[in-house]
Image: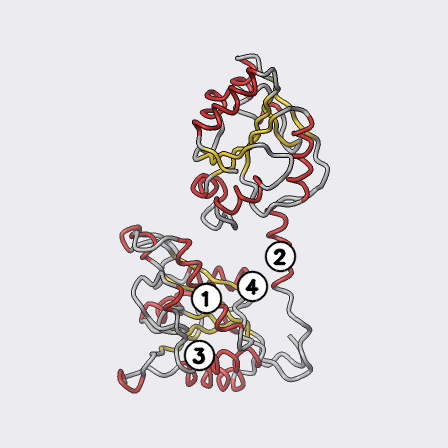
Amino acid sequence: MLHSVETIKMVVDSAKAKGLKVGFTCGAFDLLHAGHVAYLSAARQMCDVLIVAVNSDDSVRAQKGPLRPIRTQEERCALVGALRCVDAVILMSDRRPNRLISMLRPDLYIKGGDYNHRQLNSAPLVEAYGGTVVLIPVRFDVSTSATIKKIVEASVHASPASTSKAYGGLILLDRDGTIIRNIPYLKDRLKVELVPGAVTALTKLQDAGFELAVATNQQGIGLGYLTFDEYVAVNGEMLRKLGTSGVRISRIYTCPHSVADECICRKPQGEMLRRAMADLGHDPGRSYMIGDAESDIAAAADAGIAARLVSESPQLEGGNRESIESAADWILLDAAKSGKEVGQCR
């Protein structure tokens, strides 16, 4: 059960008045695993009442980056609180537990054995009022970060290629106006709509052996019009819609900065494209860019790769714009003419 600071203080004071030993620990507890359960069970055996402080979403992001936590603070608190060994749960908005420790003054401050005494900034505080710091040996060599890494590694391993001819290479795609309809500062995943012909075009390229990745400017994040979480949710919906047709995006590269930030990654600079080629192991001679803005074309030129300028409705815009299907056909023809075939499998 999730408690307020005031309620937790009453629980601790009541336990101490009865002569009970109070233990306190804290953590993100993102993707609850066997290591967490073993550690918390061992902690409970050392005390009569175990209080667990779960880091808030904001405090986890501050420590681990914008893509964490995987589970929300409400989910994480509910999971930890459901464990038999945990007596009470409190949400901790600070990165470090010093404020809560000063308020609750637990008898034991307990942490996992992957820490050492010198790493615990709260240890002197606990020992100053007569408390004890306890480190519990690691029983399961597992972590949330390692679990996420394993999932990512598993997800990027496709089935062996067929024996059909493949070109090999990388297709870099802008997102808005190229794969999905262009809605300024889109943050509602329910409004995600694929551009007509996108699935057909990307399927052709993928079947020919090209790897697909996205490189997108998203200054709305830097300007505060949407959060990184909202942006990731929109991407998730796009990937889901593409995935139902068998289209797979290997990686998404993002520039979240505004023009005023003067960053090195924002298109028309080619930094995101060069990074994608380096990460995914492709050279410029086998890479192409498809985008709906002149900045996409300029970024491709800066990175030394060929590019095609597309539109959701090329028949209305005219000029040098084409549909994404037409762009895919041009790339396949160019790859064949340029001798970019790589044999029977990639």
- Kind of residue at badge 1: Glu
For badge 3, the amino acid type reads Ala
Q: Earlier in the sequence, mark 4 or mark 3?
A: 3
Q: Can you identify the residue that label 4 sits on? A: 280
What is the C-alpha distance between the residues marked 3 and 2? 27 Å
**Crowd around label 3: few <14 · some 14–19 · many ≥20 (10 Å):** many
Residue 325 placed where, x, y %? Answer: 43, 84
Badge 1 marks a residue whose secondary structure is: helix
Question: Mark 1 or mark 4, which has the lower sequence index?
Answer: 1
Q: Secondary structure at mark 2?
A: helix
User: Which kind of residue does numbered mark 4 sit on?
Assistant: Leu
Tell me the number on the disc at residue 198.
Answer: 3
Sequence-wise first label, 2 or 4: 2
Label located before the other in sequence (3 or 1): 3
Q: Give the CA separation, mark 2 to mark 4.
A: 18 Å
Of mark 2 and mark 1, the one earlier in the sequence is: 2
In this rendering, the answer to whether 322 lies above or below 289 is below
Residue 255 rendering spot, x and y as whole percentages: 39, 57
Which residue is depicted at the point 34% across and 79% down? Answer: 312
Residue at position x 64%, y 54% in the image: 150
Residue depth check, mark 2 versus mark 1: number of the one nearer the observer: 1
> What residue does disc 1 label?
237
- Distance CA(mark 4)–CA(mark 3): 22 Å
Label placed on residue 151? 2
Q: Label 3, label 1: how many angstroms apart (C-alpha)?
A: 15 Å
